[in-house]
Image: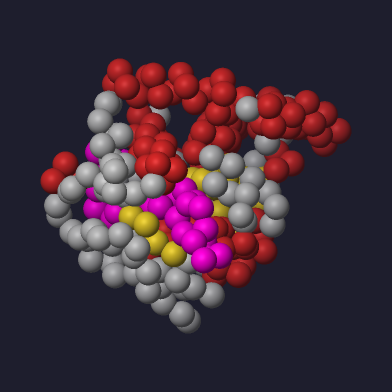
Amino acid sequence: MSDTPIDMVPQEIPPADLPSLKGEVSEEEWRIRCELAATYRLVQLFGWDDLVFTHISARLPDEDGQPRFLINPFGIFFEEMTASSLLKIDVEGKKLNDSPYTANAAGFTIHSAVHEVRHDAGCVLHLHSPYGIAVSALEEGLSRLSQHAMQIHDDVAYHAYEGIAFNLEERARLQADLGDHSCMILRNHGTLTTGANCAIAFARMYYLERACEIQILAQSAGKVIEESEEMSRLVYQQSSPLWIKGIGDKLIWPGLVRRLARENPGWDV
């Protein structure tokens, strides 16, 4: 077994006390930092967070051909995440910015696995929501019970549970199972989505989470009607062009940011 190179001991310094990185990093990195910090706060706003656990990452432009990404500092709650508090690390686990915090070890394993091979994954979002975990524990996984489910059903991969993701050798299996899919259900664990940016990854997670919630509610109420593979394929094909045209980043994301500005401002510092 290979252990992650991340120290598991968190710090206890409030994010407000950390120095601002605005003007200290490139404009592009600052833009991505602001988007990722907003995504963390939106996850909490939607009730999808799990204390300091679970994680979201955003890929930065490669330097010297090596993938680098931003991820949450372990010990900061999602609702207090800021652009300057995010950690910059590489796929070897090396911290690339000065911070008293470290990354979540399991988060490093999962996110470095994806960023190492999926250059199209500008953002990777992983949750432990009750409905997502419930569906991950069902033998049939995500069923074709709703339009929400059918819009992503053919883009969902599955990964078998291997314990808490401290073993770096699991990365190869995560990569193989995800393949070129945009969504993944981690068995007995949770959900994961990817996107070209934070906006699209968040929108996909909304559909996946809502599909899981609808499924559990429907199955608990009585006998369900599952649509055919043919119908599900049709709905998926109808929906796929919408992601390309920007439903996540051009239609949904601006409103989400406006909502966040009203209800929990301060992520962009």
Residue drawn where x is 40% and y is 52% of the image: 70
For image coordinates 25% across by 60% down, the residue present is 98
Q: Which residues are magenta?
A: 56-80
Q: Indicate the quadrant where residue 183 lies.
A: top right
Please, which residue is most extreme toward the right here?
Answer: 230
In this picture, residue 175 sits left or right of residue 199: right
The image shows residue 143 at horizontal and vertical percentages of 68, 38
Q: On the rendered structure, is 190 left or right of 97?
A: right
Decide if residue 9 is on the left or right side of residue 207: left
Instruction: Say which quarter of the image contains residue 33.
Output: top left
Which of the two residues, 208 or 171, is positioned nearer the viewer here? 171
Q: Nearer the viewer, residue 72 or 226?
A: 72
Residue located 56% across and 58% down the image: 114
| Residue 8 in sight from this viewpoint | yes
Image location (x, y in percent) of residue 19: 18, 48
Task: Report x, y in % for residue 215.
Answer: 60, 32
Where residue 90 sits, quadrant-wise, is: bottom left
Most foreground residue, 68 or 145: 68
Which residue does the image show at 15% across and 54% down from the upper left?
A: 12
